[in-house]
Each structure stands twice: as C-alpha cells, then as structure tokens.
C-alpha cells in the first residue's frame, strides 16, 4: 500500500508541473504570440481555455498535495474508502 502512495505522490508532482505548463501556454497565447500568426479572437479563446483548465488542475493538484503530502497515510486511506 505504501508503493501506491508513492506513485500517487509522483503523479501529484507531475500534475503540478502540468499546471505550470497550461498556465504558461495560456499566457503565452494571449499576450506574447505575434498577431499575424493567429487571429486575436482565436488566441484569446484558446489562451483562456488553457488558463481556466490550468486553474482547474491547480485546484485538483492542491487537493492531492494536501491528501498525499500533508496528511498522515492513515487519514488518507480512511477518506479514499468513501470516495
């Protein structure tokens, strides 16, 4: 059961890096890409979608960080039984 917790911790760390990626791509699309490459409405729609998804992933990553890094394993196992 401890190996499963380690894999979930690794997955949580990877998810945190993906949050940075999604937010970075969204900000890049909205503010830094040249206007002659992609039209502005498409850039804003795509960029805001990446940013909102990144914020959603940030929320989920925060919950996982609390669950797998801060709480004791006994508390986490009890909660997972009911999820």
Image (cartoon, rainbow, N blue to C red):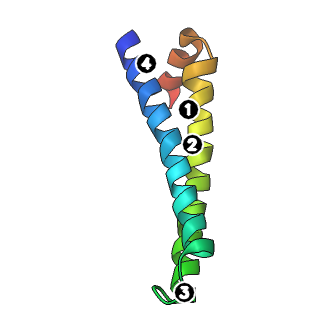
Q: Are marks 3 and 2 in contact (CB under 8 Å)?
A: no
Indicate which disc, 3 or 1, sits on the residue closer to the N terminus: 3
The residue nearer to you, when weighing 2 against 38, is 38
Q: Residue at label 3? A: 35
Seen in the picture, residue 80 relative to 3 is either above or below; the reply is below
Indicate which disc, 3 or 2, sits on the residue closer to the N terminus: 3
Badge number at residue 64? 1
Residue density around tag 2, few if under 14, some if 14–19, many if 20 or more, within 10 Å: some
Count of numbered tags = 4
Q: CA distance from mark 3 to mark 4?
A: 46 Å
Residue at horizontal 63 percent and vertical 73 percent from the top: 31
The residue nearer to you, when weighing 77 against 47, is 47
Residue 8 spot, x, y in % from top left: 43, 26
Residue 34 spot, x, y in % from top left: 53, 81
Q: Are marks 1 and 2 in contact (CB under 8 Å)?
A: yes
Residue 47 spot, x, y in % from top left: 55, 71
Indicate which disc, 3 or 4, sits on the residue closer to the N terminus: 4
Which element carries disc 4, helix, strand or loop?
helix
Residue at horizontal 53 percent and vertical 40 percent from the top: 16
Which element carries disc 3, helix, strand or loop?
loop
Q: Are marks 3 and 4 in contact (CB under 8 Å)?
A: no
């Amino acid at each position: 059961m401890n190996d499963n917790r380690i894999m979930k911790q690794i997955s949580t760390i990877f998810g945190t890096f993906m949050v940075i990626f999604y937010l970075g791509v969204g900000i890049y699309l909205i503010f830094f890409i040249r206007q002659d490459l992609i039209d502005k409405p498409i850039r804003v729609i795509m960029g805001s979608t990446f940013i909102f998804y990144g914020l959603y992933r940030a929320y989920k990553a925060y919950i996982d960080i609390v669950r797998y890094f801060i709480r004791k394993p006994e508390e986490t196992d009890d909660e997972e039984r009911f999820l």
